Amino acid sequence: MATLTVAGSMLLASTAQASKFIQPGILDDAQILYGNPDKVFPILQQMNTKLVRVNLWWGGPALTVASRRPANPTNPNDPAYDWATYDRTVTYAAKFGMKVVLSILGTPRWANGARGWNVAPTNASDLRSFAVAAARRYSGLHAGPDGTPLPRVPYWLVWNEPNNPVFLRPQYAKVRGSWQIVSGRAYAQMCNAVVQGVHSVSRDLKVGCGVTGPRGNNNPNSPRPSVSPLPFLRAMHAGGARGYDAYAHHPYYGSVKETPATPPPPPPRGQPATAVTLGNFQLLTRELARLRIRARIWVTEYGYQTNPPDRVLGVSWADQATYMKQAYAKLKANPRVDMFIWFLLRDETRLNGWQSGLYTASGARKDAREAFEGLAKKK
């Protein structure tokens, strides 16, 4: 193992102290954003939920805020913007004592020549202007339609899993005859745009970049090229990503045999595993230290699917609850980790979807429902 820098050694040594700030939360747009808030938010409150993560669609297939180009893009009251559903969600979250994590996601057609919502904007200044408008609207000082100030959103994310071509493409391109991780460099500009936009409203608002998925094939010649977390982190760092308050990551397990303590298996040819899961989470903290990145760490997605109903990828209900508690304990032992967001509240109805909810699709409680409720009570 390479010798760490002095700064890196200091950061690693600090992990002997437990986090004082970690908060448990839920990501489930189907329930939190689109569901009946009068039913969903009381349940979240009963579970001691401290955070709710919501995808804020700048443009794309969901609740698009900016379907047409605004005349005054930094003004949240520009008539091109439609914030109605998000206003409702942040208002309910505040009413029930929860803080919101807003993930800015999706490029409008007008911002990239209609190349798709998962292609970076042609001009990062358009994204920066939208971030200014969103942060102003949810600064705690902006009046909503009824004249009452809208609640403050303290936490912001830039995109979702940009190392995955589902969310950002292209991942690779040939530059002067060799393959380059262009997704990391494009994302660096997107990260900087949102950081600058949100921080221009208030430095007290915190922005997380990275938001990386746990795996990648690192093969530009594959039918679906993707980038594993550490090469992506290096690429976005080389691309000039700076000033973000936290690095966000999704350290999902890779098989039903993995627990929060089990490292991912190596590839068939015996090379070191490239995935970053909870089992080898120290690889991420070490790489952040090596790059002298002093940002906090946010785990903005995690979960275990259950059997029943998923007989292929699911663990038992009891194991889901046990693994949740183990995962939270492991992350709490790291003083840099500030949040632990579970995906989902309720199983998706499609069996080929996600079955990691704390409730079944029909509304039955799983063992992990009570386990989650106990997380925030632990000292």
Image (cartoon, rainbow, N blue to C red):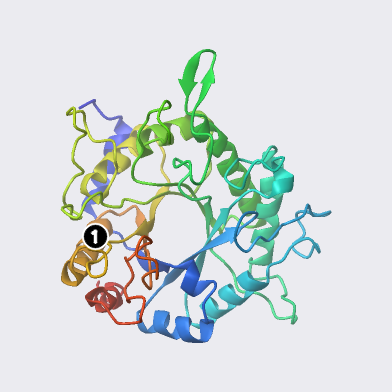
Name the residue located 54 percent from the left edge and 73 percent from the top edge.
34
Location of mark 1 (residue):
327
What x and y, as percent, mark residue 50? 41, 73
In this view, the residue farthest toward the right is: 71
Q: Nearer the viewer, residue 78 or 119?
A: 119
Name the residue located 70 percent from the left edge and 81 percent from the top edge.
148
The amino acid at mark 1 is Ala
What x and y, as percent, mark residue 232? 42, 35
Name the residue located 63 percent from the left edge and 72 percent from the top edge.
85
Is 146 rendered above or below residue 133? below
Is 245 rendered above or below residue 356? above
Where's the N terminus, which quadrant? top left
Q: Can residue 226 be seen here?
A: yes
Name the residue located 78 percent from the left edge and 52 percent from the top edge.
69
Q: Residues within 10 Å of mark 1 (few under 14, many from 20)?
A: many
Q: Can residue 338 be seen here?
A: no
